[in-house]
Image (cartoon, coloured by chain):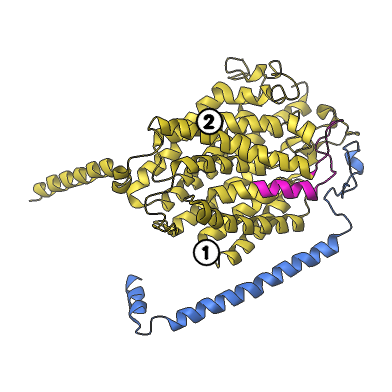
Chain colours: A blue, B yellow
Amino acid sequence: MSTNGMSDWAVDLADTAAVYPLQGWEVPMFIIGLIFWIWWHWAQLRQEATEIQHETEADASGDAARDAIDRY
Amino acid sequence: MGNNLDALTTLFTEFYYWVTVVFMFLIHVGFCLYEVAASRRRNHMHTLMKNTMLIPLVTVTFFFFGWWIYFAFPNGPFINGGINFEGATAARPWDTSMGTNLQDHISGVFWAAFLLFSWTAASIVSGSVIERIRSGAFWILAVIIGSFAWIIDASWGWHWDGWMVKLLGYHDAYASGVIHAIAGGFALGILVVLGPRLGKFAADGTPRDIPPHNKWLVTLGLFLIYTGFWGFYAACNVPIISPEAIGGQITGETWTATNIYLAPTTLSAITFNFLMSLSGGLMMAYIVSKGDPFWTYSGGLAGIITASAGNDLYHPIQAMIIAAIGAWAAYKLHYWVERKFKIDDAVGAVAVHGYAGFIGLVIAGFVLWGQPSSPYEGYATINPLGQFAGAIIMFFVLGFLPAWIGSKVLNSMGLLRVPEKVELEGLDFESEQEYQAAIADVVSAEKALVK
């Protein structure tokens, strides 16, 4: 069942290298990582666009903006 | 120290743990900042002192009996053997190892590394219960988790000889369960009895947000906790040891760093995984909370905590994805539990530490399935069932249950919660009155001197 090829530590550490699980799947893991990163930018840009739209539509009189400027 | 190499190894190990202790101090500084910032102005000083005074109380009790428990209870006792009196001899507070001793360079720094974990466990709980718990009750509960409950779990599941490691194949290298799940469960056990802050829930049960008085300081506190977390990770390792000293199945003569189970790992591996899990947690928490700073920072923490059980072995991309899952789940579960069960966890500690730690243990059971939990022969390998049982033991048996019982007892004696009037006035009311009177007095006296 072990996905790193080890079921015990009866090894010579001089001859042992990678010990992480799913060895051989590094490229698919890398692609999953890339997808996560790209997804993050897509989701963040969408959220920010919504936030900016709400802020643009708010405070039609400009009073809140003047207060914010006064507060520095 | 037989020769110069032995001497260098011993002194390096001594210095290594000492440095981790200094780093870990920042965890407590961070918790204090973040907790005070989350409280309202009328509660500041009590909130600060509540967290500060757990330091001496947990320290002295950990010296008196906590450290001894770690070495005496790896068998349960009575699960896989009796109390290990012989193995715990050097941890008795009256033993010569527990003092200035030129033959023992390690006991003091190793004790201190564990002690800082004890403070952390208690400090995690502290933030959840702000603004209504009595300090005296909290300090009793802090000793229960800091010098008793957590160190029992460490003896069981964070010890090379612990029964959970042997029989369940329990693997929790950087303490998803042994610190975080237990502390989250402990906080929940108190909160169930303590109840929410006044005004937290509307009459129809709808939760209200109680914003921190200083949003920026909250995040600065969490930033400092990240910094201290580096020391925590390093302290979980044995920095340098030979296969001969381990005495297990490892062959050859290559020295190594190990995790607490004496299974090989490297500082380099955990540096990869610490940073990638921090990043996975931050990225997911930012999206799920829609950019909320408090939850984004908390999500970074939840990410590391979720990946911590297996961060000695994971690939960095695995650590990142596992962290993202944990951060997402912690955020969602916090608000679901708040709405469903009317639990007022002021800083989200049950979610960030408890749920993320629990989930991290379970995930490690699947991702590390079949890998050895120990360098010693006859130990169960890591498996999902063992990890799930371990998560239940950490969160409920050693976390929730002792806190719930302790809180019930304190509550029955009228010692758990401050009266409603005091909660509304603020815990600092009397000292604030004295402070203002002192200012008025000295100001008027000085003005009278002006010619």
Q: Classify residue B182 by image quadrant.
A: top right
Q: Classify residue B238 by image quadrant.
A: top right
Q: Residue at x 32, y 44 (%)?
A: B420
Can residue B355 be seen?
yes
Q: Which mark is residue B144?
A: 2
Q: Classify residue B92 by image quadrant.
A: top right
Q: Dividing the image into 4 quarters, which one contains the C terminus of chain A?
A: bottom left
Residue at the extreme left of the image, as rendered: B451
Could you tell me residue B283's position as x and y percent?
63, 63
Circles 2, 1 touching at the beta carbon (< 8 Å): no
Residue at the extreme front of the image, as rendered: B204
Front residue of this view, candidates B286 and B446: B286
Front residue of this view, candidates B14 and B329: B329
Q: Secondary structure at mark 1?
A: loop
Could you tell me residue B274's position as x and y percent?
68, 51
Q: Is residue B279 above or below residue B95?
A: below
Numbered range of the magenta stretch: B358-383
- Asked whether the residues under marks 2 and 1 belong to the same chain, the reply is yes
Q: Is residue B287 above or below residue B180?
A: below
Which amino acid type corresponds to the residue marked 1 in the rendered image? Asp
Which amino acid type corresponds to the residue marked 2 in the rendered image? Ile
Q: Residue at x 48, y 79 (%)?
A: A54
Q: Answer whether residue B218 is magenta in the image.
A: no
In front: mark 2 or mark 1? Answer: 2
Crowd rating for badge 1 (residues with CA inside 10 Å; few <14, some 14–19, many 20+): few
Q: Residue at x 76, y 26 (%)?
A: B6
Q: Answer whether residue B360 is magenta in the image.
A: yes
